């Protein structure tokens, strides 16, 4: 059974490029031209294995669309890769750490996305193995859900930190109006890492389940 990818981008040419391009690499694809169309399709019992979501859309942008996706228990666990031409800020990196699997800077071709998509799907399989392991140890579903959330935030924030370092190098980068900068994001990273390590210890998660 082929992997189902939903492309959400309000630029028709780019949408079609990814719908056709990813099909060439063996994926099943659907494309919609906006956030509302994405939500309507999901509510119509369509459940993709992964969503490629553009951030800069109108009238509903990617961030609002993402919030709706993650607020609905029926499809909040669908992995999302954000695509955008907008530079990432440190505050956005903290916020996105809880909601997405990766953040891709445009322009990018379908071919370059294939390895990223396959890596995310492999991580989803490893997360399921982690969940099975935790259940076998008698952890509650609430404990498991929280652990998976922190586990993902720990992994994704590391990926976003590398993206920020590639973008800005040793400079302070693009800060938010409230002056949230690299030191603040690093503090967040250390907090998440500490919580992840404590949960791993308390829940007896097998050492070596690192993604």
Image (cartoon, helix red, strand yellow):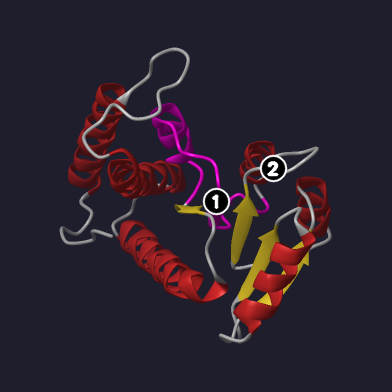
Quarter of the figure with the C terminus? bottom left
Task: Give the distance between the C-alpha atoms of the residues marked 2 and 1, in whole angstroms.
Answer: 11 Å
Q: Are marks 2 and 1 in contact (CB under 8 Å)?
A: no
Instruction: Name the element at disc 2.
Output: helix
Mark 2: few, some, or many residues within 10 Å (few <14, many ≥20)? many
Mark 1: few, some, or many residues within 10 Å (few <14, many ≥20)? many
Point 28% across, 34% down: residue: 192
- Which image quarter: residue 31? bottom right
Please say whether residue 86 is one of the residues in the magenta stretch: yes
Q: In this rendered view, identify the residue nearer to me: 43 or 109.
A: 109
x, y percent for residue 126: 35, 67
Is residue 35 visible from the viewing direction of this image? yes
The residue wearing badge 2 is: 65
Q: In this rendered view, identify the residue nearer to me: 14 or 191.
A: 14
x, y percent for residue 135: 37, 58
Which stretch did the figure color magenta? 74-100
Is residue 46 visible from the viewing direction of this image? no
The residue wearing badge 1 is: 82
Instruction: Name the element at disc 1.
Output: strand
The disc, 2 or 1, on the residue closer to the chain's N-terminal end is 2
Quarter of the figure with the N terminus? bottom right
Residue 8 horizontal side relative to residue 22, left or right: right
Point 49% across, 69% down: residue: 113
């Amino acid at each position: 059974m082929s992997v189902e990818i939903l492309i959400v981008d309000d630029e028709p040419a780019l949408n079609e490029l990814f719908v056709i391009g990813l099909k060439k690499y063996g994926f099943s694809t659907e494309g919609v031209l906006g956030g509302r169309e994405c939500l309507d399709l999901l509510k119509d019992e369509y459940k993709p294995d992964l969503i490629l979501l553009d951030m800069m859309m109108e009238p509903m942008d990617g961030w609002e669309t993402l919030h709706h996706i993650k607020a609905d228990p029926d499809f909040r666990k669908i992995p999302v890769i954000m695509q955008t031409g907008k530079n990432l800020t440190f505050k956005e990196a903290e916020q996105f750490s809880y909601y997405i699997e990766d953040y891709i800077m445009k322009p990018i071709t379908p071919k370059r996305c294939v390895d990223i998509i396959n890596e995310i799907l492999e991580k989803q399989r490893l997360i399921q193995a982690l969940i099975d392991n935790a259940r076998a140890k008698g952890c509650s579903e609430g404990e498991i859900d929280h652990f998976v959330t922190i586990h993902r935030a720990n992994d994704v924030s590391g990926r976003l930190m590398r993206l920020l370092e590639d973008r800005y190098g040793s400079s302070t980068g693009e800060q938010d109006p409230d002056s949230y900068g690299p030191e603040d994001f690093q503090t967040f990273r250390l907090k998440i890492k500490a919580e992840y390590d404590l949960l791993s210890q308390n829940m007896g998660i097998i050492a070596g389940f690192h993604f």
